[in-house]
Amino acid sequence: MSTPAPGRDPLELELLSDTALLPGVRKTLRDWSVTHGWTPEQAGEIALAVDEALSNVIRHGYGYDRTQRIVLSVRSICDSVQGEGLEIRIRDFGKQVDPLLICGRDLADVRPGGLGVHIIRAMMSSVEYACAEGGGMLLVMRKFKLHRITQPGTHGP
């Protein structure tokens, strides 16, 4: 069971579904992560996973409509087994899809694009998609400091 880590400031962002905002979000996440004890490499992994998730929301949830709302929150957590970590929540208000259908394409299908879900799962310790109450989707990702990234398409050690 993960609980909020005491004494750590959460990060709350509300942004529009505009890909032009993604570089600023990545920088903000890297900076927040480093100031909360993550290594620059881990901070890059966190920013990459969030960038892929936001790109998927913009593309699939909103069909590239740049005027829609996305809520991003990040908080430090502590798990009795896995130790220090963080939890990232991305809430959109776009199309709902069955969470069981959210998967990356077959990695044997070699072509550009379509690897975002694989990248997210490789960078993070856990990834959960859910239909949000009132429409849209909620993505909850957790990463623990002891987590080692996995090859895309695998589920870890």
Image (cartoon, helix red, strand yellow):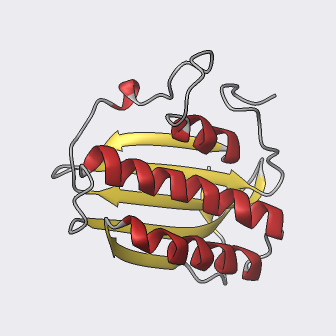
* Residue 132 visible at all: no
Q: Which quarter of the image is occupied by the C terminus? A: top right
Image location (x, y in percent) of residue 10? 55, 78
Quarter of the rendering containing residue 107 = top right
Q: Is residue 45 above or below residue 102?
A: below
Query: Dividing the picture into quarters, in which one does residue 131 lie?
Result: top left
Give the x, y percent position of residue 81: 77, 47
Pick out the residue farthest to the left.
Answer: 134
Residue appearing at x 22%, y 65% in the figure: 68
Near-viewer residue (55 or 78): 55
Identify the residue at horizontal 69%, vertical 73% (top origin): 33
**In the foreground, 75 or 65:** 65
Specify whether residue 48 is in view. Answer: yes
| Relative horizontal placement of residue 22, taking residue 27 as reference (left or right) | left
Q: Is residue 133 above or below residue 151?
A: below
> Would you say 127 lies left or right of 94 here?
right
Q: Nearer the viewer, residue 51 or 7?
A: 51
Q: In the figure, is residue 148 to the left or right of 52?
A: right
Using the image, determine if residue 80 lies above or below residue 38. Answer: above
Corner quadrant of residue 69: bottom left
The residue lying toward the viewer, choosing from 67 and 15, is: 67
Residue located 21% across and 51% down the image: 94
What residue do we see at 34% from left, 58% from top? 91
